[in-house]
Each structure stands twice: as C-alpha cells, then as structure tokens.
Amino acid sequence: EYVHFKADKDADLSEPMAQIREKAAAADLTDEVREEDAADFDEYVSHLHTYLTDLKNMQMTTGLHIMGNPPQGEKLTEYLYALVRLENPDMPSLPKTLAQAYGYDYYELIDNSSKLLPDGILSYGMLLDKINGQCLEIIRLLQNDGFVVHEDKLRALECVKCWDEAVQQKIIKIAGFICDKLYPSLAHTTWERSNCIRALQSEYIEPSAGGAPTSGGAEILPTGRNFYGVDPQLLPTPVAWKIGSQMAEDVINKFVAEEGRYPESVGILLWATYNMRSNGQCMAEFMRLMGVRPVWQKGTLKVTGIEIIPLDELKRPRVDVTGRISSLFRDTLPGAVCWLDKAVQQVAALDESFEDNFVRKHVVEESQRLESEGVDKEQAWRQASYRIFGDPPGAHGAGVSALLASRNWDDLGDIADVYVRWGAHVYGEGEKGQYRPQLFTNRMAKLEVTVSNIDNRESNLLNSDDYNAYRGGMIAAVRNFSGKMPKNYCSDSSDRQHVVIRTLAEEVKRLFRGEAINPKYIQGMKEFGYKGAGDLATYVDNCFQWDATSAVMEDWMYEKFAEKYALDTDMQKWFAEVNPWALRRLTEVLLEAEQRQLWNAKPQTKQSLQELLLNIEGEIEERGDA
C-alpha cells in the first residue's frame, strides 16, 4: 500500500518539511528517508516509492515446508519463479530477459521505480510489475500444459509473441530449464522422506552440493540427498574474493559517509554455512578490510598463501578486524582460521605508520600494555594480535538466546558477560581455544562497526534466534564495554550481481514490513496450525531478543505485533483452536518488552494485553482440568 501525504491534487506541495516529516512519522517511514532526500517533496516521494517497491518485490516465506512434500498449485508457481529470478549456471534470468527486451536494465527499474517511462504514463515500477506478471503467466502456461514445452503455444502468449526471435529463443530456453530440470527436481522432494529411511538402514545416499537454490543455485536440487559443502582449501574463490572485496569497501565507504573518517576496528561474524554457500565471501571481506589477498595455485585454484596489498593500490588505511567464528566454522574450516590469523600477524608486522595501519597501531598499543603488566615481550605481541575468537572447544552456541529466553537477566551487562564467557576463546596458529576473556573484552570495547552478511533469502535475521545470539550478542558486548552503540551493517549478496549494504535497523524494518506484518505471511503460517502458531510466537520473541541486544525495535513495531498477532479477534480464535500456548507466549513477550522499558506501550494496548493474558491462562487451565 502506498502512503499518500496529499490526497488533494490541488494541494500546496510547498508545505514546510517539518510538517512533512510529522506526517511521515505517523506513517512509520521517517527513518527510511535520508536528510538529503527530504530537500524537497518530489525527492522525498521518489525515495519513498523506491523503498516501497523494494518491499513489494522482496522474497519472503509464506508458510512452512513439510518434509518430503513438493510445492503444489500457486506455491509451485511462485517457487519456480523464485528459482528463475536470478541467473543460474548457463541459464539467463527470466525477468532480466524481459527487462532487456523492453530496453531496460532490471536493476535500473528497481532502483528508480518512481521514474516515468518515455510515454509519461507508466513508471519504472509499473513496468516491473508488468514483467513480474508476464513471468508468472509464462510459468502458469507451462504448469497447465503438464510442464511440457509447446513452442507454438508459448510463442502465442501475448507477453511473448511481441518479441523478436532472439528474445523468444531465450524464453524458450528458460521454459525448457523449468520443465526439464526444475519441475522434475521439485517433484523429487519426496526423496527427503525415502532417503531418510534408506540412510537409517545404512544404504548409500547420492551426494550433492549444498547451497541456496533461489540465489542462483537451482542446480543443487533436488533435496533429500547427502549434501556436502566445499573443499576448504579453495576458500575464498576468485569470485568470492571479488564480491567480498566489494562488501568490505562498501562497509568502509558507508562509515566514511556517516562519520567523515575511516573506521579503525570492525567486528565480523564468520559462519561456516554462509562461507560454504558463498565460497568464502566473509573470509574475503575479512582479508580485504585488512588489506591482504589470497594467493591461488595455478590450475587447482587452491589457496596457498596470503600476500599484502600495497597501500598505493589499497588507497586507504588497513582496518583492524576481529572475527567471531561459529563452532561449525571452528570444526569444518580450521585451515581458514589459520589463514585469517596469519593475515593479522603479517599486517601487524608491516613497517607502516599508525595512520595507514590500524592493525599495527592496536597491536603495538595492546602489547605495550601487556608488557607493563609483566607479560613476556614475545608473548605480549602474540596475545595482542589475537583476532579470531569462538566457542569453547567442543561447545556450540553463543549463550545469549538461552539467557534471554530464561528471562534471567537484568541489563546489558548480563548479556555482554554471557557473550564473553561463550566467545572469548582464541583460535589460530598454535591456538586451540584458550579462554582469554580480558583480551576479548578489550577487542569488543574498541569495535566501531559490526558486520554480518546475507547470502540468501531462504532464511533471515528474524526467523532464528542464532542470528541475534551471535551478532546481537556482539553488539550488546560493544555497547556495554565501550559505552556506545557501534555502526551495524548488513551486506546483502543474495543476488551476487547486485550487492546491497544496509544498516541493521534498515534490514530489520525491511523484514518487519515486508514479512512479519504482511497478511500474506500471516495467512501462510496459519495454514500450518499448531506449528505455524508456534513460529509466529517465535518471530515475536526473536524481534524482542534483537531489541534487547541491539535496540532495533521501535514502539510502532511492537504496537503492530500487538494489533495483528495478539489483539486481532480472528487471530485469537485461531490461536485458541490450534495453539493457545503460542498466544500466551507472544503476549508474555510483548508485556516483557513493556516491563523492561523497551516498548513505551499505549495504555490501552498494555491493558488489553494484560486482560488477554489472564483470559488465556484461564482457558489453558480449563483445558488441563478437562
């Protein structure tokens, strides 16, 4: 839905910006409008239009997957479209093909959605809607024909017949890909059940690469096979290095644009699954920030070393980076841990000024402090250069989600202490997880930026508590030990050809508006009864936990959760039928947010939630008695 600040066509658009911002605040969109975009009303509306178009076209979930059940009906149509929205190996993108046929770049249409076409009637965003509709029309034709390509019928479609032979051939090629590869692969989703049984009987299961199908990885389908990651010796690959380098420079440029100087210290989250799917993009970003690059062996492309990027080529200072690795990264990519640790040591040893080399600056300062405390000079230097931290050996997790779920915490300091207890174990060359809480605390206190990356849209920051436990825990630690909020960025490379950087707050609000309070999402979850209700409650809980660590929720967001999840009469009836415990849980979470002063709830909303909780307790008790 579009926000209309002026419904009257004759209205005066010279209204003072203060009033415009007031109206924007009422629409809960002020935070998305930059100061320079608000210079005049036309630019303001243009930016707002582009933002809403992005929400409209974002990939979101509309339900849950049942093991072994292939998608059917309209869900099959939409999933097939999601699989061909981006290029796959040797296969063009369907919407990009149509955009090019119209004479436009697909990303140009997205990034300038309010711009008018030469006819002066349709906008870029309207053309994008038309293209999306035509893509779905093509897929529905194939679906209705039993996924057999009839070229004559395909060419006869209104959205196909107007194009020249070259465009039609591309569309026919993509149609063949859908019918011959994608649909049969999705039909084999049944292998998830049958192969699970076969695995339990010690039978051989065909191997397959893992990854994200909707991020240009459709070739990994069908699921239900014995998936593998990658050869760790190949990470990062040259392509991942290119994308990771771009993400690193985006982080630096965004910080410079906001602060007017270079960041000295960055904290980055390193997960094994992300780096396996993206072939080492986070590792590449870590290296690029410090100003080093991998050396690949000719022929095999195995990483055989690290080399320094000269300052005159880097054209900026070397940024200090601290990596918080997951337990799976520790266990599956030990070689990568050593490479990253070696990179830190090499950069710290360079004969460069502190203004050009923040890694050396901080290692020298820290080693001098340790020496003054009686630590041997060599050991002081080694300890001062620790930058890779993770879980205790053999342990898994970050501890934060369990703490928040138990409600056994009082303030940010409690969260930070748990994050340190779980994450302050050192890894690298000769280091196997020794607990160094003071060194880790010192690193957290110096971080000016935290970074985590998004490589696919099949999961997101709000549908699992792990994202907050690791990344949110880092932010909580920085806030507690430094006394201020760091800059928090997310690099979205789910479309490898169109990498976008957003702040964490922007990413959370994007997900909240596009998914959490989207009626289509809510309805999709309702189709799954007890489990769907439980996942809605989990969504609310995850948002609350993000707010506890990172202060990303605003009052209007909690109000929306209360309005659409808890206080809606139809939702209450549904929860009562399928899972009243989920309604009790999400109501308790909302009230906890208010009690902890994370949410300044409207008096009526608070009262309604309190009354609802009492009613739910009574109903659950009656069920128990029955």
Image (cartoon, grey):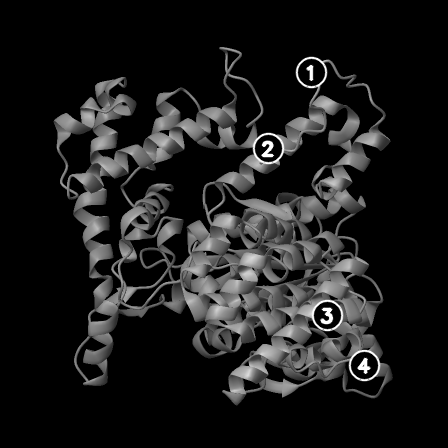
The three-letter code of the residue at mark 4 reads Leu
The residue lying at 24 percent from left, 23 percent from top is 166
Q: Nearer the viewer, mark 1 or mark 4?
A: 1
Q: In the picture provided, is 576 more to the left or to the right than 490?
A: left
- The numbered disc on residue 9 is 1
On-image quarter of the N terminus = top right
Q: Which residue is mark 4?
A: 370
- Give the mark nearer the N terminus: 2 vs 1: 1
Q: Nearer the viewer, mark 2 or mark 1?
A: 1
The answer to whether residue 238 is above or below residue 576 is above
- Give the mark nearer the N terminus: 4 vs 3: 4
Is disc 4 in contact with disc 2, using a CB cutoff of under 8 Å?
Answer: no
Q: In the picture provided, is 377 more to the left or to the right than 296?
A: right
Residue 352 location (% of width, % of height): 73, 57
The answer to whether residue 381 is above or below residue 542 is below
- Give the mark nearer the N terminus: 2 vs 3: 2
